[in-house]
Image: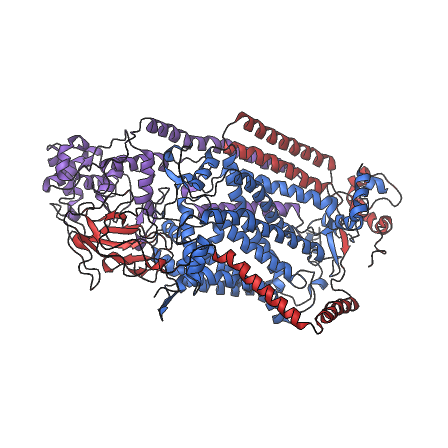
Amino acid sequence: MIDQALGWLDERLGVSKSGKKFLDKIFPDHWSFMLGEIALYSFVVLVLTGVFLTLYYVPSTKEVIYHGRYLPLVGKRMSEAYASTLHISFGVRVGLLMRQTHHWAADVFVAAIAVHMIRVFFTGAYRKPRELNWIIGVTLLMLAIVNGFIGYSLPDDLISGTGIRIAFSITESIPLVGSYLAFFLFGGNYPGTAIIPRFFILHVLILPAIIAVLIGAHMGLLIRHKHTQFPGPGRSEDNVVGSPLWPNFAAKTTGFQLIVFGVLFALGGLIQINPIWQFGPYLPYKVSYAVQPDWYMGWLDGALRIMPSWEFAGFGHTIPFEVFLPGVVLPLVTTLFFFAWPFIEERFTGDHAPHHLLDRPRDRPLRTSFGAAVLAFYVVLFGASSTDVIANFFHITLNTVLWSFRFLVVIVPIVVGVITNRICHELAGTAQPREARPRRMPNVIVRSDEGGYETYPVSPYPEDEAIELEPEPVPVNVDQDATA
Amino acid sequence: MKAYHLLIPIALVAIVAVVGPLSSDAHGPTLASSTAVLSSRDSTALSNAGDGSSTSSKKHASNVIHLPKSYIPEGRILFEESCASCHGPTAEGSSRAPNLVGLGEATIDFWLSTGRMPLSAPTVQPVEKPPRFNKKQILEIVAFVHSLGPGGPGIPRVNLHGANLANGQSLFTLNCAACHTVTGSGDMLANGVFAPSLHIATPREIYEAIRTGPGNMPRFGPNTLSRKQVEDIIDYVRGPIQHPNNRGGIGLGGVGPVAEGFVAMLALAGLILVVFWIGERS
Amino acid sequence: MTEESMSYNVGESAGASTESLLNDSGEVDEAAPSGPSALDPRLAPIAKNPERVEKVIVGLFVLGLLGFAAFGALYWHGGRQPQLEGVFIGVGLMSLGFGLSSWGKYLMPRGPFVEERHPLASEPQAQEEFKEALVGRGKYVLKRRGFLAGLMGLAATVFAIVAAFPFIRSLGPVPGDILDKTSWKRGSRLVTADGRPVKVDTLQVGGILTVFPEGHAGSAIAQTVLIRAADVSITTKPGRESWAPEGYIAYSKVCTHAGCPVGLYQEQTQQLLCPCHQSLFNVLDGAQPVFGPAPRPLPQLPLMIDSEGFLRAQRGYEVPIGPGFWSRS
């Protein structure tokens, strides 16, 4: 049966040779190589739950009167978008589970991309020949953030509506073309009726399609380049050591996929996220205090909050730098800077050789401390997005919090960078190249009967010794009984 | 491989066993009470009949609580003991504290019954605490201060029969949510002033606060919000705000994406622990 | 290493290095059938006691099965119970996942296995041939026919431009002077969100109301915050002596920073706070920003009180409301 099927396929596609190679593909066993998979599987959950939601969500701002199950809103006028989201939450069986899982998956998706990117950065995995894949990854991060924001806006509730208003203002702030772009995007002046359907088609078709294609390219390049790996016994620039795709890695990663699914669905069922029925429908003249965007937009919101009011007005024109810089320039510069980083580093170090062995962060103190500083910058901006919550929590004035953040956004990155640099130098210690240095062993001190002391090294994990086997290519059949 | 992996699902089930009933408790009564309210709700919407200021309080005598004159002497003693050192013996105010004459019974009742007054030390904004006086003592002080000069709103009798929850939602998001947040959690405003949480407010306190505008809160007079409208708001606060329908699970305090982002990070950390287990660590 | 030399010769390499290791893991020794060169330690599972692991995995799979069955039963029952739904399906998926991962981690060949990496770049000759074919043939095509290529390029460019036009230009109207105007006009009556006209006794001192021009209740652009800061006329800026009769002051409710509704009125300090990015405006000083990112005061609407006691706008806003934009002068 399976013989026939494979034969049929091979005669038409010639897949046997590449198929076998694919099954033999080696995945490094180190845990940090699986971070990207969290993002990948979150995306799968997003697609699955998202398809479910599209069956019930109505992308329309047409006014309807609500007659659903949530009693405090019965008889109220609201947009069809909001009413259908209420219906998903209260009327559709497992609808709320799907909606909340979708939202949690989005939050975890972006977070996992960020953590994966941090791993790639600090180990230098973006170096030649992987610069293109780094660029694809950065693009994916930005698209994920944008699509997250758009999806968050779709329910047309009081809080997300305020976010759309800010998006209009940010678009409007672009010099020369801003108001045109804003009018084109919204189909006229704010609020209009076009934005919800337009956001919908972006959210469910255009952006996910681009994301899916880029994920495909990301993984295609991964197969083309093969994995990077940490240096170690038997590992070199010319090989990859680890487990084969089939069966080890397939089992582990499929299992892990199910775990990611399980965690997200459990979150979706147990912990409430974005309870839009508590917010009420959006009306442009209503507002709630303590409004924050989802966490991945926090750095932009924080930048908007702490930016001084530097508006330029003159020559008959206005450039609202207080919105343009944090709202447009910051994300653009961030993206371009991340795009350019591998090339900047290459120019800086003059190192044009391909690299497949990863750096330990401590061995590249300059990169590591710079990366830590950049990371700290965005973390501070993220913190600044909850100035009011922080002020309320610590019972200090908003003024104090705002001014603290204006200073912290400069100071913290510098301090973090300097401290990281120190730590790297401390940890690096010896100037010996890493490969040549023997693995350090703990010592056991034994006191003899006569009172003398004796010291000898031991392995910290006796099981480890087995791992120090010479790596071999995967045999065609891995069944011990069969090879015997 | 250890058997403790089994503990994870078991722990989850245990969490549910705790959370499940909690959340159903949380929304059960709300839905029940809203059903009751809705079934009896008056279909006539906004009644524009203002309940007037001082003149109409006589007309709608049943809407306010009248305090007997006999309360005044006791009230004077309590006032002199606890209030006069700042507000002066005849409540005329001082450099440390405002004049209380003519502010109305509702104002005095609000500040005393929420425990915000008397203060042990001057602050930017007094906070809610258990009241110093019992209910009768509070009314005695109110009666005394009111005897010093008339004016201001009286202590309301709140009647939530016939209140409209949906109108309350609309009025709340328009007039209250801007400061108290849409979930009623409250937040920090400018200059160290904060909008307090509404989660433990009683109907009378809410009514008094709306009418008298304590501290930095604006004042909503009877021509701005009618008696019926205030009662709609109170109904919404007592219902969905104080007993939110947390159908989706643990409510995270109603502070929105900040807490949600934190949970997402925890989930990610948990997943990273899982890859830490699946992968190798050397 | 080339493909050919990558023979999967297990026994040979294993034979020498395994002996000592087999002693370490005695169970493996017992469990596997003993052949002369049979046992490659890389093919042994990590688990010292595979039977026990199997038992645990069985437990996990059964738990997963139960979780899914419970979810199915719950759904069949029709109970709208997001918590139980999430837990049943979550526990089911997680159990299955942990079981499968354990299977992969503990019961499959431990390795390590290796894969050779070949240089990505092609041989210089191949590179050269590719370049030659691409450029050389291109030159052949263009030889003495550059004009044709130019013309086609021009046509394609024009197509790109005219094709882009419907995609962009059709999206919406051009702004024109729309952003400079609101629907406030000379003599517009102030009405509340539900359309009730505002009279001189509507607000008490210290009161606040969101108002609109009559006929435009609910307008996102014309929304205005009406505050009664006193019971006598107030001058918020020189030249605005008549703008705030009876203490009624009206400002645009659209923040000059990012456009959020400025709805937080602090009555004692006479300040308006924007909830989104915490810009603070001084009500008595023409809504001059005193704190936060807002660059400009909220525009003030000049008010008057007509003979019947209704509040009216003397005229519309003198400056464009809301956040800044390029053509705002």
The image position of residue A5, as x and y in percent, is 79, 40
Hue used for the chain lettered A:
blue
Q: Which chain is red?
A: C
Q: Nearer the viewer, residue A59 or A332?
A: A59
Vertical side of B178 occupied by B161: above or below = above
Q: Which chain is purple?
A: B
Q: Nearer the viewer, residue A391 or A450?
A: A391
Which residue is depicted at the point 19% across and 41% down? Answer: B108
Q: Is residue C48 left or right of residue A381?
A: right
Count up the numbered dots: 0
The image position of residue C107, as x and y in percent, is 73, 40
Image quadrant where residue C56 sits? top right
The image position of residue C265, as x and y in percent, is 28, 51
Residue A178 visible from this viewpoint: yes
Name the outermost residue toward the top: C77
Q: Nearer the viewer, residue A411 or B161?
A: B161
Vertical side of A202 occupied by A399: above or below = below
Q: Quadrant of the N terminus of chain C?
A: bottom right
Residue A275 visible from this viewpoint: no
Name the outermost residue toward the bottom: C144
Name the outermost residue toward the right: C36
Image quadrant where residue A454 sits? bottom right
Q: Nearer the viewer, residue A113 or B139?
A: A113
Q: Is residue B214 left or right of residue A318?
A: left
